[in-house]
Amino acid sequence: GSLEESAFRLALNTRSRWPRIVDQSSDLHRFRSPVGLDHEKKEVTAFLGAESGGYQLIRGRQFVGKSTFASHLIKECPWPVAYHFIRSDRDNWDDPETVLSSLTDQLRLLFALPGREEGQGKTAVERFRAVLHMAGNLLEDDPTRHDQRAVVILDGLDHAFGLEKRCQGQLLKDLLPRQLPARVKVILTSRPGGHLHHERCPSYDPIEFEPWRTHVASPGTDGETERNAETLKMISNDKTLSEALWALSVFTEPVPLAALRFVRPDITSKTWQNEII
């Protein structure tokens, strides 16, 4: 048969052998590649390059493009990635047992780790923590794989743990190990919230994800830096405009900047609302 047919049969075989893996491939590929974000990409690259295990938290408000950036990292990562998009409007995609079981079996599949049968009788949390250590030990024990990383990307913590969500009040410390083995990297994305703060939660290497703010605040020429700083101050004090530009920043960095130049002359009189709408 054709290559496409072979890939389809392989996907069916994988789903039948690994039924706990949540197939989110269609969601992964619906995101467009982000434009710019060089600073954020460099921070993630540096985080992945370090041998020590750990967490990186990409934190930002709604509609700033966290999921778009996460999908880019999944597709562009030099190593295979176990990933999950938490969503409260999809069947059990926000259920901790479903999330951790999917990530666990993805790691087993990616690293050919044994022990699915040995996990019988253990909780999803116990199986996930065990497989993280198995992956770390595999990379540690094989000198030819010291440059490799076991990467997990978990997008949208707030969809499960935020206010009025399925797991409100449940602590991340009860799901994610505080310490990770060397070469094991977990990247999390979330809106800000109390679910990220607890003395026993994992410590994160944070990225404050603010694409339009970073771009507008960057140095310019011919007095543009000063004008940008003045505009940024006005935006910060204007909740409606701020929210509008957060939404625009999902798509590209230049769009919010163009919007700023468009509305700057009328920003204090609010005529921009009629102009844009």
Image (cartoon, rainbow, N blue to C red):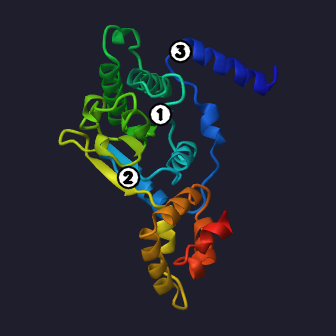
Q: Residue at x 45, y 40 (%)?
A: 156
What amino acid is at disc 3?
Pro
Above or below 153: residue 174 = above
Lower position in the chain sequence, tag 1 or tag 3: 3
Question: As drawn, which residue projects farthest toward the left?
Answer: 199
Q: Residues within 10 Å of mark 3 (few under 14, many from 20)?
A: few
Q: Residue at x 29, y 20 (%)?
A: 126
Q: Secondary structure at mark 1?
A: loop
Q: Badge 1 is on which residue?
A: 86
Quadrant in which the N terminus is drawn = top right
Is 13 on the left-hand or right-hand side of 171?
right
Q: Secondary structure at mark 3?
A: loop
Q: Badge 2 is on which residue?
A: 47
Is 93 on the left-hand or right-hand side of 183?
right
Q: Badge 3 is on which residue?
A: 19
Give the distance between the C-alpha atoms of the residues marked 3 and 2, in whole angstroms: 32 Å
Residue 27's spot in the image, x, y percent?
A: 61, 35
Q: Secondary structure at mark 2?
A: helix
Residue 66's spot in the image, x, y percent?
A: 49, 49
Decide if residue 34 is in sight here.
Answer: yes
Lower position in the chain sequence, tag 3 or tag 2: 3
Quadrant in which the C terminus is drawn = bottom right
What amino acid is at disc 2?
Phe
Q: State the residue in front, 84 or 147.
A: 84
Residue 186 is marked as: none
